[in-house]
Image (cartoon, rainbow, N blue to C red):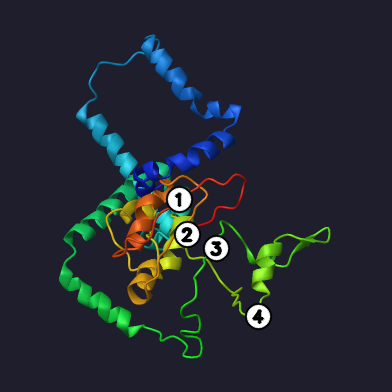
């Protein structure tokens, strides 16, 4: 678990509390039993501390041995997984090779770097961003551009839904009859060669990618970390600014989950016509926005 995820827990705890309790098992107490026993023994003074001070020579020796062992471990890890700390594409590898304590310290250093970069950013750097964006800009297909002008735009965002379910049957019955009917319409465009590109933000990263065409953060959730303080040039805002659209969003969870109650408003910047309407459905449905 990264520092950014820990700091953003307040943004998702309401949506995760129920599932966390549902996943809890009685034997989970064994993971914490040793700490409970140690604390009880300390309170009962069964565990006694040696009041004698450690000598400087002994402390230096222990520190030196620990440093050499840690450096050796890092060297072996780099040999087996080159650029382990440079790329950090998967935090699980760092925990595997260096341990969870070292990972947490390293991740704290990374989080401080990111925070420093944000504070030191200047407006002049925006010119380089615009230059890069213009250089890689891909023009829309003229045959497709504008064919749905003036129509309503409806986006169904399904949690953990995969393409193989479209058209699938169980005992002769369609698994997703409504989605099948949408997919098979002559005026529907369906894309099956599609890959998710999300980070630790999971569903919220997918929503950000869908609405803004930008990636999430390498650490933590963009919605939870930056969503309250930033405005986004997202699809709802663009549709409002250019064509006068009004937008509404419905979600089957609590408003604060992934900080959506704040981010959805910022996705519709410069418009007062996007109410954030979140409801809990009477029947159990896939998580959708």
Q: Please indicate whether residue 35 sits to the left or right of residue 64 in the image.
A: right
Examine the rendered structure and indicate whether residue 66 appears above or below residue 28: below
Q: At 43% from the left edge and 52% from the top edge, which residue is drawn? A: 94
Q: Can you see residue 165?
A: no
* Residues at marks 3 and 2, CA–CA distance in whole angstroms: 43 Å
The reply to whether callout 1 and callout 3 are in contact (CB within 8 Å) is: no
Q: Nearer the viewer, mark 3 or mark 2?
A: 3
Residue under label 3? 156
Q: At 43% from the left edge and 47% from the top edge, which residue is drawn? A: 255
At mark 2, the secondary structure is helix
Q: Residues within 10 Å of mark 1 (few under 14, many from 20)?
A: some
Residue 97 numbered tag: 1
Residue 208: x percent and y percent? 41, 63
Residue under label 2? 80
The reply to whether callout 4 and callout 2 are in contact (CB within 8 Å) is: no
The reply to whether callout 2 and callout 1 are in contact (CB within 8 Å) is: yes
Residue in front for this viewpoint, 262 or 277? 277
At mark 4, the secondary structure is loop
* Residues at marks 4 and 2, CA–CA distance in whole angstroms: 52 Å
Residue 241: x percent and y percent? 33, 73
Q: Earlier in the sequence, mark 3 or mark 2?
A: 2
Examine the rendered structure and indicate whether residue 284 appears above or below residue 263: above
Q: Earlier in the sequence, mark 4 or mark 1?
A: 1
Q: At 41% from the left edge and 59% from the top edge, which residue is drawn? A: 78
Q: Earlier in the sequence, mark 4 or mark 3?
A: 3
Residue under label 4? 186
* Residues at marks 4 and 1, CA–CA distance in whole angstroms: 53 Å
Q: Nearer the viewer, mark 2 or mark 1?
A: 1
Q: Residues within 10 Å of mark 2 (few under 14, many from 20)?
A: few
Q: Earlier in the sequence, mark 2 or mark 1?
A: 2
Q: Residues within 10 Å of mark 4 (few under 14, many from 20)?
A: few
């Amino acid at each position: 678990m990264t520092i950014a995820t820990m700091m953003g827990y307040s943004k998702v705890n309401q949506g995760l509390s129920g599932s966390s309790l549902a996943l809890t098992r009685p034997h989970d107490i064994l993971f914490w039993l040793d700490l409970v026993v140690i604390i009880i023994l300390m309170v009962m003074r069964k565990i006694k501390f040696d009041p004698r001070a450690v000598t400087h020579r002994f402390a230096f020796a222990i520190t030196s041995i620990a440093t050499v062992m840690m450096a050796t471990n890092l060297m072996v890890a780099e040999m087996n997984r080159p650029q382990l700390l440079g790329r950090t594409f998967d935090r699980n590898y760092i925990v595997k090779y260096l341990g969870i304590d070292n990972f947490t310290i390293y991740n704290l250093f990374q989080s401080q770097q990111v925070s420093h970069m944000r504070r030191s950013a200047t407006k002049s750097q925006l010119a380089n961003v615009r230059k890069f964006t213009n250089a890689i800009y891909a023009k829309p297909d003229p045959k497709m551009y504008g064919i749905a002008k003036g129509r309503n735009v409806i986006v169904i965002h399904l949690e953990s839904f995969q393409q193989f379910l479209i058209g699938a049957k169980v005992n002769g019955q369609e698994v997703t009859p409504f989605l099948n009917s949408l997919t098979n319409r002559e005026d529907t465009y369906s894309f099956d060669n599609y890959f998710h590109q999300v980070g630790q933000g999971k569903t919220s990263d997918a929503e950000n990618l869908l609405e803004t065409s930008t990636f999430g953060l390498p650490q933590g959730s963009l919605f939870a970390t930056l969503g309250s303080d930033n405005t986004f040039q997202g699809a709802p805002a663009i549709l409002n600014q250019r064509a006068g659209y009004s937008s509404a969003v419905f979600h089957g969870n609590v408003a604060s989950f992934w900080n959506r109650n704040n981010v959805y408003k910022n996705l519709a910047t410069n418009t007062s016509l996007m109410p954030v309407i979140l409801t809990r459905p009477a029947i159990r449905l896939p998580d959708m926005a």
